[in-house]
Image: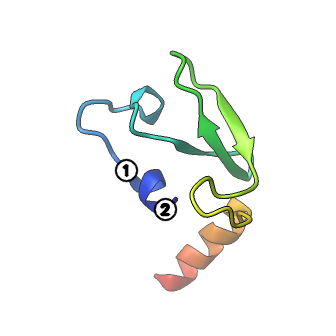
Amino acid sequence: MSADLQHRCDVHPDRSECPDAFIAKVQGGYGLMVHDGGSSVVEIAFCPWCGSKLPPIARLILEDEEDD
């Protein structure tokens, strides 16, 4: 999931336009991007690759700041 969230496309400056971007941060959680020409996202509570429960984004941000 981390690799997908950090992916930056050389062709599409906006992640919502890139067909290789699958995950987005939304409202303190995560979502699957709906590539229908808009910026729609379907919120998820579990990782689509491994099935583990996803932590809230605020917790991840605090942990990332502590690592710096």
Is residue 34 depicted above or below 43 in this figure?
A: above
Answer with left or right where residue 57 lies relative to residue 22.
Answer: right
Residue that appears at 33% across and 46% down: 8
Answer with left or right where residue 26 lies relative to residue 18.
Answer: right
66, 20: nearer the viewer: 20
- Badge 1 marks a residue whose secondary structure is loop
Residue that appears at 42% across and 26% down: 17
For badge 1, the amino acid type reads His
* Mark 2 → mark 1, Cα distance in angstroms: 9 Å
Total numbered labels: 2
Percent across and percent down for residue 14 are: 41, 31
Percent across and percent down for residue 66 are: 56, 83
- Badge 2 marks a residue whose secondary structure is helix
Percent across and percent down for residue 32 are: 61, 40
Which sits earlier in the primary sequence, circle 2 or circle 1?
2
Q: Are marks 2 and 1 in contact (CB under 8 Å)?
A: no
